Image (tube, helix red, strand yellow):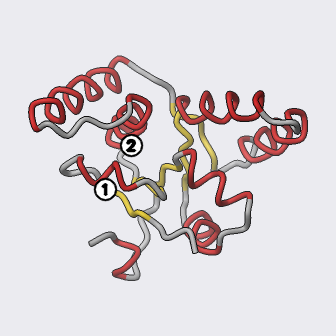
Amino acid sequence: MGVARLGLRPARIVLDTSAYTHLLAGHGDVVDWIARAEVVHVPAIVLGELEGGFRLGTRYAHNARTLDAFLEEPFVTVAPVTVEVARRYGEIFAVLRRNGTPIPADDLWIAATTLETGGHLVTFDRDFAAIAGLPHDVLSPV
């Protein structure tokens, strides 16, 4: 059971690509998570996914400006890929592969970043449930 369902909110959250996209759509749960957080981490991997999506779309300049404005908020940080994150990635990758439950590589990086920052992942992606010990909440799109 995620902490959201217990009525608690961690001080440090991590947004994946799906959570950021739902934030832009005004999804109430994501807005609430961000409003209650002291720190919002956006993994560098998420920035890459967003950049790719922006460039495939027709509103690149608008989307890039909106993201830049969000990243300039004082409570938002970009979480880089560090040596420690890479080691966590390798650990998670090996466990999931041995268990026969691999997930997409970008999600592995996001999970590793979440663990390394001590954050709580906010997502709409159920793939993260395969990672034992990952603090996360999977939100409902509606």
Q: Gap in Å between the C-alphas at discs 1 and 2?
A: 8 Å
Instruction: Identify the image quadrant of the N terminus.
Output: bottom left
Residue that appears at 52% across and 46% down:
16
Instruction: Identify the image quadrant of the C terminus.
Output: bottom right
Where 119 sits versus 85, above or below? below
Query: Three-letter amino acid code at disc 2?
Result: Thr
Place of residue 51 in the rendered image (x, y in percent of width and height, measured from the top left): 70, 29
Within 10 Å of the Cα at label 1, are there few (<14), some (14-19), or many (20+) other Cα atoms? many
Q: Which mark is residue 109?
A: none
Residue that sits furthest to the left in the current view: 98
| 118 to the left or right of 102 | right
Q: Which residue is mark 2?
A: 114
Q: Secondary structure at mark 2?
A: helix
Where 24 sits versus 88, above or below? below
Q: Secondary structure at mark 1?
A: loop
Place of residue 98 in the rendered image (x, y in percent of width and height, measured from the top left): 9, 31
Residue that appears at 16% across and 26% down:
94
Place of residue 113 in the rendered image (x, y in percent of width and height, measured from the top left): 40, 36
Total numbered circles:
2
Upstream in the sequence, badge 1 or badge 2? 2
Which image quarter: residue 78?
top right
Within 10 Å of the Cα at label 2, are there few (<14), some (14-19), or many (20+) other Cα atoms? many
| 39 to the left or right of 109 | right
Q: Are marks 1 and 2 in contact (CB under 8 Å)?
A: yes
Place of residue 49 in the rendered image (x, y in percent of width and height, measured from the top left): 60, 32
Q: Which residue is mark 1?
A: 135
Query: Three-letter amino acid code at disc 1?
Result: Pro
> 91 or 21, which is in the foreground?
21
